[in-house]
Every structure is written in structure tokens, then in C-alpha cells.
Amino acid sequence: MKPPMNTHGDGAMEHWTCLLRVLPDRRAQIERSYRVSSDFREICDDYADCVAILETIAGGSRREPTAVADYEEMRERLEQEIREWLASNPL
């Protein structure tokens, strides 16, 4: 089950919420890090964009295996980068 995406009052998505699918026990740290670090926010935004694109192309009627594989690899790299960032920035 996917956690719901949260919205700010202006309707903008909080991209860190998609990380709760893979790192549910790190919610507080992810939320704080997203709020205070532009570097972490950029990685999270890239991850969320990657996940959204992957969900779109993987579920589409014209699925392209190469594109899916490329985005899965990108998602894994970004997820690893996020895990490393969280480990080295315990906030």
C-alpha cells in the first residue's frame, strides 16, 4: 500500500513522502532533512520524479523494456544515495 502524497497549502506535492514506501521507519528524519537541506530536497525530488515516470511507463500499454530498466536502475541509484545521505546526516 502506497502512503498518500501530502500537499502544502499551495497544492505542491511533498516529494519526500514517496520515500515512505521504502524507508517507513525514517519518516521523521526524511521530513526534517527535506525541510532543511536543499541538497537532500533535490535528491528526493529527483527520486519522486523517477518513481512517477517509472510507474507511468511500466503500466502503460506501450511498455518499453529498455526505458523501464533504465528508470529502475536510476531509482535504485537515487535510493542508495538517499540512504547514504541519511546515514551521514543523522539530524
Image (cartoon, rainbow, N blue to C red):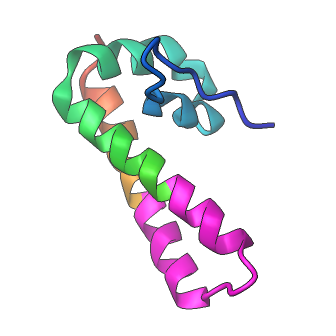
Residue 65 belongs to magenta span: yes
* Any part of residue 79 in sight: no
In the image, residue 11 sits, relative to residue 56, either above or below, namely: above
In the depicted view, which residue is nearer to us: 58 or 30?
Answer: 58
In the image, residue 43 sits, relative to residue 51, either above or below, namely: above
Q: Is residue 75 left or right of residue 46?
A: right
In the depicted view, which residue is nearer to us: 18 or 7?
Answer: 7
In the depicted view, which residue is nearer to us: 69 or 80?
Answer: 69
The spot of residue 43 in percent (x, y) is 30, 42
What residue span does the magenta drawing correspond to?
Answer: 51-76
* Any part of residue 91 in sight: yes
Q: Dividing the picture into quarters, in which one does residue 40 lie? A: top left
Q: Dividing the picture into quarters, in which one does residue 12 lie? A: top left
Q: Is residue 30 left or right of residue 42?
A: right
In the image, residue 80 sits, relative to residue 72, either above or below, namely: above
Residue ID at (60%, 20%): 25
Residue ID at (53%, 54%): 51
The N terminus: image quadrant? top right
The spot of residue 41 in percent (x, y) is 28, 31
Residue ID at (60%, 39%): 22
Residue ID at (28%, 10%): 91
